[in-house]
């Protein structure tokens, strides 16, 4: 697993700038390039109209606001903001994309067309009505993405995950985990806290769980000082992950989903989406197989 092409969806909110800062740090250390994607989310029926306006007025860089359609003025402002955003990272190669579309659909298209290795995006910890609007795009991206997704959850831009919770059932050896752990160790000196959540419906003897988790670590060839083994009893997997992370002052939650079909894939994906939506700290979701 290598991160050479990073996608950052940006809407110029403080949260998206924090995502860009995290991407800039990764890109500088790994010599990666960043694609900045700004999506103007408009109804499908209006896209031809906007595209026609863009084709007609798009090259009129010096046009006054009153002489061009409002959407084109927004486009000019967008390009100015993108230019200002990338000027903070002079050593990084940037690609800019501004499109009219739905957010999650366009992100999926760019990932496929541009060979994106990693998506870094901002999102809020949501509940109630905010969950519907804020969390929906993030969940859709996680659900459909073929590459890892890092969700930034605050505006401060201090992404330095040295204390990482890796939540899993540890039932399968994950190639994704084997490739991912050394990257975080190299970039941040991260310690991995392996976490298995035991719910009333998934009870098993503690020695059995411990053995499986230790075998997982052994298969990955991780030094003993770089990980801990944790078994945590809670009502649900999602609540258990979030509670453990909070109690142990974790700086990032790491979740692996499987490429399996059917119910098991739905359950793993659903947990990852919900944790990413409700967490107050960054969440990194990757394909574990």
Image: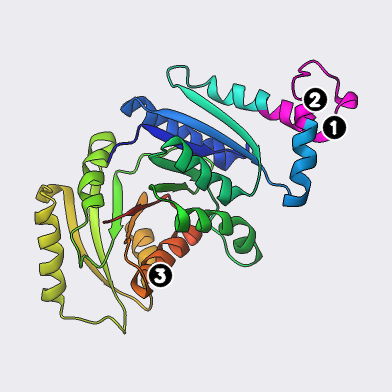
Quarter of the figure that contains the N terminus: top left
Mark 2 and mark 1 lie on one chain; the one further toward the N terminus is 2
Determine crowd level at label 2: few under 14, some 14-19, many 20+ residues with C-alpha closer than 10 A: some
The verdict on residue 71 being magenta is yes
The verdict on residue 97 being magenta is no
Helix, strand or loop at mark 2? helix
In 3D space, how far apart are the residues under numbered discs 1 and 3 (Cα atoms)? 44 Å
In 3D space, how far apart are the residues under numbered discs 2 and 1 (Cα atoms)? 8 Å
Q: Mark 2 and 3 residues: CB-CB less than 8 Å, in contact?
A: no
Q: Which residue is mark 3?
A: 266
- Please determine whether, in this image, residue 192 is positioned above or below residue 87: below
Mark 1 and mark 3 lie on one chain; the one further toward the N terminus is 1
Please state which of the two labelled residues, at mark 2 or mark 3, is closer to the viewer. Answer: 2
Please state which of the two labelled residues, at mark 2 or mark 1, is closer to the viewer. Answer: 2
| Numbered badge on residue 57 | 2
Q: Give x and y (percent) for residue 59.
A: 75, 20
Question: Which of the 4 image quarters holds residue 39?
Answer: top right
Q: Mark 1 and 3 residues: CB-CB less than 8 Å, in contact?
A: no
Q: Does residue 22 show up?
A: no
Q: Give x and y (percent) for residue 173.
A: 18, 59
Q: Which residues are magenta?
A: 54-78
Determine crowd level at label 3: few under 14, some 14-19, many 20+ residues with C-alpha closer than 10 A: some
Observer-nearest residue: 212 or 247?
A: 212
x 60%, y 48%: residue: 103
Helix, strand or loop at mark 3? helix
Q: With 22 as the anchor, is 189 left or right in this view?
A: left
Observer-nearest residue: 249 or 127?
A: 127
Q: With 11 as the anchor, is 285 left or right in this view?
A: left
Q: Which residue is mark 1?
A: 69
x 73%, y 47%: residue: 42
């Amino acid at each position: 697993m290598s991160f050479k092409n990073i996608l950052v969806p940006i809407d110029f909110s403080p949260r998206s700038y924090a995502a860009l800062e995290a991407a800039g740090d990764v890109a500088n250390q790994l010599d990666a390039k960043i694609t900045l994607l700004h999506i103007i989310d408009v109804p499908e029926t209006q896209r031809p109209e906007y595209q026609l306006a863009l084709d007609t007025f798009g090259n009129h860089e010096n046009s006054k606001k009153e002489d061009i359609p409002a959407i084109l003025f927004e486009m000019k402002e967008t390009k100015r903001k993108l230019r200002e955003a990338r000027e903070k990272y002079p050593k990084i190669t940037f690609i800019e994309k501004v499109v009219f579309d739905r957010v999650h659909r366009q992100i999926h298209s760019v990932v496929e067309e541009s060979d994106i290795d990693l998506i870094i995006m901002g999102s809020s910890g949501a509940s109630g009505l905010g969950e519907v609007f804020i969390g929906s795009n993030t969940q859709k991206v996680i659900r459909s993405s073929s590459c890892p997704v890092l969700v930034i959850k605050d505006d401060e831009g201090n992404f330095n995950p040295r204390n990482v919770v890796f939540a899993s059932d540890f039932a399968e050896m994950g190639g994704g985990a084997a490739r991912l752990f050394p990257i975080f160790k190299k970039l941040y000196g991260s310690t991995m806290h392996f976490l298995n959540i035991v719910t009333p419906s998934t009870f098993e003897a503690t020695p059995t769980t411990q053995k499986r988790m230790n075998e997982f670590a052994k298969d990955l060839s991780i030094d003993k000082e770089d990980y801990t083994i944790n078994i945590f009893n809670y009502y649900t997997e999602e609540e258990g992950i979030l509670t453990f992370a909070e109690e142990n002052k974790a700086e990032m939650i790491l979740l692996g989903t499987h490429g399996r079909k059917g119910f098991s894939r739905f359950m793993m994906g659903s947990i990852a989406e919900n944790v990413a939506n409700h967490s107050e700290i960054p969440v990194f979701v990757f394909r574990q197989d």
